Image (tube, rainbow, N blue to C red):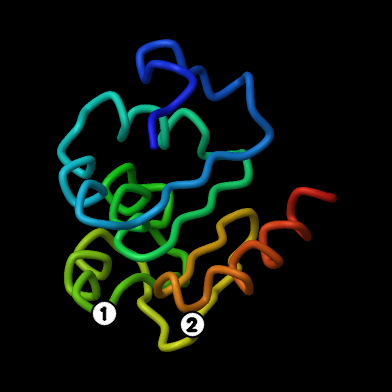
Amino acid sequence: MRSDVDLSNVKSYDYDALVFIGGPVARKLVDNEKVVKLAKDAEYKVLGAIGVGPMILAEAEVLKGKKAIADRSAADFMESKGCTFTGQPVRVDGKSVTAEGSKYAEQFANALIEPLQK
């Protein structure tokens, strides 16, 4: 699937939330300065990430001091960035919503609704 907006044209202030989806490409995005900056710029917005997507949020340091979950393969990375890796399939900590993987996509989507309504 192709995106409708080029990454260089995405501004966090144009959105109520940013959601990072996992998958093979998401691991590469952890090293993408534009993606990490976008996550950092949206620190006070609703942020969601699933699978290995939370690694992007961790790299941007927006999960520092928070509880989060991601794909199990990301546990050491997440903790090295200052977040507490939980065993829950979906975790909400303030305006941050993270999930272990696609198996929990529906729960993840439902969990994003509450912080968006505040």
Q: Residues within 10 Å of mark 2 (few under 14, many from 20)?
A: some
Q: Which mark is residue 72?
A: 1
Q: Residue at x 29, y 56 (%)?
A: 55
- Residue 25 horizontal/vertical position (percent): 22, 47
Question: For mark 1, does the 10 Å Cα neighbourhood hold few (<14), some (14 to 19), or many (20 or more) residues?
Answer: some
Q: Which residue occupies 29% across, 61% down?
A: 52
Circle 2 residue = 89
The tally of labels here is 2
Q: Please report contact status of discs 1 and 2: CB closer than 8 Å, yes or no.
A: no
The spot of residue 100 in percent (x, y) is 41, 75
Q: Quadrant of residue 51?
A: bottom left
Residue 73, image x and y in percent?
19, 75
Name the residue at 44% across, 11% down. 9
Amino acid type at mark 1? Arg
Front position in the image: 62 or 14: 14
As helix, strand or loop, the secondary structure at mark 2 comes to loop
Instruction: Classify residue 94 as left or right of residue 104.
Output: right
Picture quarter containing residue 106? bottom right
Q: CA distance from mark 1 to mark 2?
A: 10 Å
Element type where label 1 sits in the image: helix
> Of callouts 1 and 2, which one flags the residue occurring earlier in the amino acid sequence?
1
User: In this orientation, which residue lies closer to the viewer: 35 or 44?
Assistant: 35
Residue that appears at 55% across and 74% down: 91
Residue 34: give x, y in percent of width and height. Answer: 28, 24
